[in-house]
Amino acid sequence: MPAVSSMGGLAGPSFRSTASDAAKAKLDYDAFLQLFVSSMKNQDPTKPNDPAQSLSQLASFSNVEQSIKLNEKLDSLLGASSAGVAASLVGRTVGSLDNSVS
């Protein structure tokens, strides 16, 4: 049977985000929105905040939220891909790179 090479650690822990990372980012985003709204409510009417700067901050945090969601989807695709590779190996003989396990 042919030996299967390593996937280079693609499914390793360094490529997976935890649920706590996503929850922490969600908390940070919600905290930002609350702070943003309260600063808008309590701004000095004689010296209003710069609207361009405010919109820039909102756009930046929106991009961060979209990046987090994209990473979650990529993690699920990586998991499905790893499961497909593992399923294709059922019934085959697989050896390790150092030939210590087969």
Image (cartoon, helix red, strand yellow):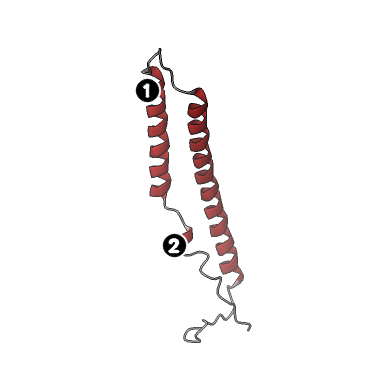
**Measuring 41% from the left and 27% from the top, which residue is drawn there?**
36
Residue lying furthest bottom: 99
Q: Residue at x 55, y 47 (%)?
A: 70
Which label lies toward us, 1 or 2? 1
User: Residue at horizontal 59%, vertical 61%?
Assistant: 81
Q: Residues within 10 Å of mark 1 (few under 14, many from 20)?
A: few
Q: Position of residue 65 (x, y in %)?
A: 50, 40
Q: Would you name the residue on which mark 1 appears?
A: 38
Residue at the extreme right: 2
- Count of all numbered marks drawn on residues in the image: 2
User: Label 2 crowding class (10 Å Cα cut-off): few <14, some 14-19, many 20+?
Assistant: few
The circle drawn on residue 83 is: none
Q: Quadrant of the N terminus?
A: bottom right
Viewed as shown, does residue 76 lie left or right of 30? right
Q: Is residue 19 above or below residue 51?
A: below
Depicted 67 relative to depicted 59: above or below: below
Disc 1 residue type?
Ser
Is residue 30 toward the left or the right of residue 70 in the image? left
Identified at 41% across, 23% down, the residue is 37
- Which residue is nearer to you in this view: 3 or 60? 60
Residue 18 position, x and y percent, is: 42, 52
Amino acid type at circle 2 is Pro
Q: Is residue 43 left or right of residue 66?
A: left
Element on which disc 1 rests: helix
Q: Which mark is residue 13?
A: 2
Q: Which is nearer the eye, 61 or 88?
A: 61
